[in-house]
Amino acid sequence: MSDPPPASSGSGWRLARASVSLPEVHGTIPIPTTASFWRKLLAFAGPGYLVAVGYMDPGNWATDLAGGARYGYTLLTVVMLSNFMAILLQALAARLGIASGRDLAQACRDSYSRPTTIALWILCEIAIAACDLAEVIGAAIALNLLFGLPLLWGVCLTALDVLLVLYMQHRGFRYVEALVVLLIVGIAGCFALELWMAKPRVGAVLGGFLPSPDVATDPNMLYIAIGILGATVMPHNLYLHSSVVQTRKYADTFESRREAIRFATIDSTVALMSALFINAAILIMAAATFHGSGHERVADISDAYQLLSPLLGTRLASVLFAVALLFSGQNATLTGTLAGQIVMEGFLSIRLRPWLRRLITRLLAIVPAILVIVLYGERGTGPLLILSQVVLSLQLSFAVFPLVMFTGDRRKMGAFVMPMWMKMLAWPVAVFIAGLNAWLLYQTAAGI
């Protein structure tokens, strides 16, 4: 039986409401109606941190390490701008989910033809596979560094994390969110200590947040910059966020939905600022430790681990680095499971058992990882991580443009259509992302 259309939403959708997103957890977290601002904010807190996980996964590590080691603090401005773009786009994703009662995949299926929907689904699955590839390799490298487990075995072992995901979801969605926040705090704590050991120059760090023309004129720097963009603004996170905000049980009234949009935006903004700290910390640590020390070509996570102890003078530096990497890889698996389910159900209206969906996604990442390890050994994992982030960046426009179009359409959003000031930011961001990707493709084709 179809649900009624959300209060104050537009009538520009083909279907009144076909189905709810993530039905097993939809509307399961109650929101107190008469509580204080802070209690309501706490009730809404959580989805933003699930999204933030994708902005600090092992793929970010490879691009941030490469950027800091090769170019010092110069690419900090790319990290910052990418994060600000992410904050804007995730706010739009939350707005779409709450106002329309649809996640982004469902909105696309409701608005586009069947062939277009299938094409968008395939592109999104490629993006999820690229992201999962980074998680698989990152977790395998962490297990190898901490426990000496061979990379090949580590990659295969990561397929079992589906059991953890299913167990946490069975306990309740709040448990998933709590585990995610706990792991984020652990990652942040590890890198706070790493920065204290690395002792970066404050003036140089602040200068790195100022734009540099070298980013656009140096092809190699641009490649890393686009990799950072792809690792920061992740396409599947837009689908994920538009769905998980609907786990809150707010009333089907204009005032309740407007309040939900406000609190969801605060939640994701605060959470993504923590991701900005962690991404910037990785790049700053790499710049302070490797740049100018004869180790500028360090982009491999294993090399960074081996060099941190002698360069910073303590074994603890390497251990903290590996622990944070393991936390990062495991954290990202939680959100990858949900994103895969949302995308398949939203685009195709097909439901698979969660363990089967996760296993399929994992296999798509494990197979190329195993091939690279067998053919090229550990040295092949670093370039593969960076390539996976560039692939993510190339998929971005196919999620960003529909999101901006839907949330800017009064017929679809009704009273919740994004205001003019957001349109004046969102469209330039969408065009900027598309332009960067076009420039990358041109340089690649021209062999520059």
Image (cartoon, rainbow, N blue to C red):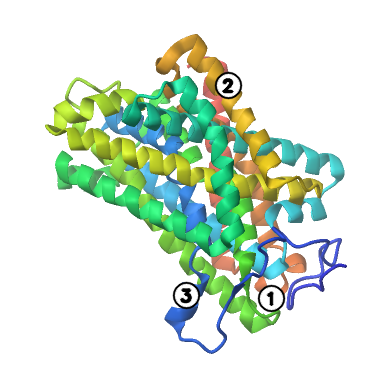
Give the left or right position of residue 296, taking residue 53 as reference.
Answer: left
For the point 66% across and 63% down, the residue is: 25
**Where's residue 15, x and y in %?**
86, 62
Q: Please state which amino acid type lies under the numbered disc 1.
A: Ala
Could you say which disc has been placed on residue 326 in the image?
none
Please name whichever residue, 220 or 106, is drawn nearer the observer in this view of the structure.
106
Q: Label 1, on which residue?
A: 415
* Quarter where residue 13 is shown: bottom right
**Where's residue 346, x and y in %?**
75, 51
Please name whichever residue, 426 or 199, is drawn nearer the observer in this view of the structure.
199
Q: Which of marks 1 and 2 is nearer the N terminus?
A: 2
Q: Please state which amino acid type lies under the numbered disc 3.
A: Leu
Indicate the secondary structure of the residue bearing disc 3.
Answer: helix
Q: Cα distance, mark 1 to mark 3?
A: 23 Å
Q: Please state which amino acid type lies under the numbered disc 2.
A: Pro
Please name whichever residue, 79 or 325, is drawn nearer the observer in this view of the structure.
325
Q: Cα distance, mark 1 to mark 2?
A: 46 Å
**Where's residue 9, x and y in %?**
74, 73
For the point 56% across and 24% down, the residue is: 442
**Where's residue 37, x and y in %?**
45, 82
Q: Earlier in the sequence, mark 2 or mark 3?
A: 3
The vertical placement of 96 against 191, above or below, is: below
Give the left or right position of residue 352, taking residue 41 as reference.
Answer: right
Give the left or right position of residue 66, taking residue 366 as reference.
Answer: left
As drawn, the residue found furthest toward the left would be 313
Q: Label 2, on which residue?
A: 368
Please rate how many residues cluster around mark 3, counting C-alpha atoms within 10 Å: few if below 14, some from 14 to 19, many from 20. Answer: some
Q: Cα distance, mark 2 to mark 3?
A: 42 Å
Could you say which disc has been placed on residue 41 in the image?
3
Indicate the secondary structure of the residue bearing disc 2.
Answer: helix
